[in-house]
Amino acid sequence: MRRTERYRIDHANSLWHIFKTVPFWKVVKNFLVIQIARYIPFLGMKNRLYRMFLRMEVGEHTAFALMVMPDVMFPERVSVGKNSIIGYNTTILAHEYLIREYRLGDVRIGDKVMIGANSTILPGVEIGDGAIVSAGTLVHKDVPAGCFVGGNPMRVIYTEKEVQERIQSDEFFMEERSRQND
């Protein structure tokens, strides 16, 4: 279940009320910072831009790949833990403008999380530490720590236990192969 705050709107759809919900100059500044950061190849500089100008929480050694699009309206509601990777062209949303309401929700991405390219993360979700999100996934609900998820709709492909078993069997296979080559 996503954790979002809901705000009802009368008359025209909620996007027509956008500048009643977020200041115009904030959106302009955020848009410019995000567009610059999308193309900067220097990860440290990109993280500093996000922290300083967008007030995002970004952990040490986190890597935002080329073309990642954090929420332009409410980037301060996005937090990413340490040593995580956000894949190419991923979109992270902290808002939804709908016909009769708009919704806001914090997005929390844990430590050592891998998010594959072209994924979309919706408002109000939490992605647990060590989780892996397959490329092209629509993250519409929480992702438990250590799980491997993917698809649209998103589903758990491997639980944390199954992921650990696969890692151990891969390590065993690599050790065997190494002994055979010696």
Image (cartoon, helix red, strand yellow):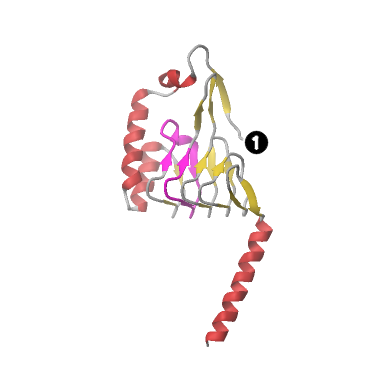
The residue positioned 45% from the left and 35% from the top of the image is 76
Residue 106 drawn above or below residue 109: above
The residue positioned 41% from the left and 45% from the top of the image is 68
Residue 155 visible? The answer is: yes
SS at badge 1: loop
**How far across and down, in percent of the image, does residue 42 sit?**
33, 53
Circle 1 is placed at which residue position? Answer: 1
Residue 89 in magenta stretch? yes
Within-10-Å neighbours for mark 1: few <14, some 14–19, many 20+: few
**How far across and down, in percent of the image, does residue 172 sit?**
62, 75
Tell me the magenta residue range. Answer: 69-92
**How far across and down, in percent of the image, does residue 156 sit?**
64, 50
Residue 134 drawn above or below residue 166: above
Q: Quadrant of residue 163?
A: bottom right
Direction bottom: furthest residue: 182
The residue positioned 44% from the left and 55% from the top of the image is 61
Q: Is residue 151 left or right of residue 77?
A: right
Residue type pointed to by label 1: Met
